[in-house]
């Protein structure tokens, strides 16, 4: 079997610093955050789309890491979720939607 880095998903350090790699990480962080919060609320894609004023295809694209996380989009999703949002761009990008404290 081949021992190239693609067979083990090892990314060379110099690739981790490229803007393309970091942008993909941000898209994946948004996808994970949206899916996790939507699932925790028990909402369908259609329900989130309606609450956020988006179409279902856009929500699906977000959850498939196909949309760049712009601030207006994150604000729209946070409002739809009635949540605070936490963004940690250090290292591997991370985004979390958290319920407002009661």
Image: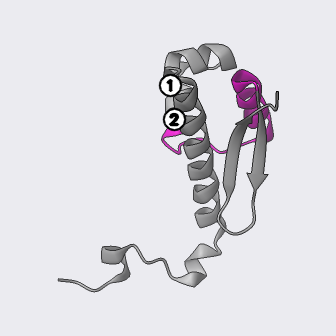
The residue carrying mark 1 is 57
- Visible in this render: residue 74? yes
Horizontal and vertical percent position of residue 70: 74, 42
> Mark number for residue 61?
2
Q: Is residue 55 magenta?
A: no
Q: How is the image coloured?
A: one colour
Q: Are marks 1 and 2 in contact (CB under 8 Å)?
A: yes
Element carrying mark 2: helix
- The magenta region covers 63-82
Identify which residue, 16 or 48, lies in the foreground.
48
Circle 1 residues within 10 Å: few <14, some 14–19, many ≥20: few
Identify which residue, 65 or 90, lies in the foreground.
90
- Between marks 1 and 2, how big is the CA–CA gap? 6 Å
> Mark number for residue 16?
none
Say if 20 sits above or below 1 in the image.
above
Horizontal and vertical percent position of residue 57: 50, 25
Q: Is residue 93 left or right of residue 4?
A: right
Task: Name the residue at 79% across, 32% down.
Answer: 75
Say if 52 sits above or below 16 in the image.
above
Task: Name the residue at 66% across, 66% down.
Answer: 19
- Visible in this render: residue 53? no
């Amino acid at each position: 079997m081949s021992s190239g880095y693609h067979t083990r998903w090892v990314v060379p350090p110099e690739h981790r610093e490229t803007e393309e790699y970091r942008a993909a990480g941000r898209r994946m962080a948004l996808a994970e955050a949206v899916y996790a919060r939507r699932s925790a609320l028990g909402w369908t894609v259609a329900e989130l789309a309606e609450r956020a004023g988006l179409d279902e295809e856009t929500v699906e694209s977000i959850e498939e890491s196909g949309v760049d996380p712009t601030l207006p989009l994150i604000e729209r999703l946070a409002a739809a979720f009635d949540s605070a949002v936490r963004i940690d761009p250090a290292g591997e990008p991370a985004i979390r939607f958290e319920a407002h404290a009661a």
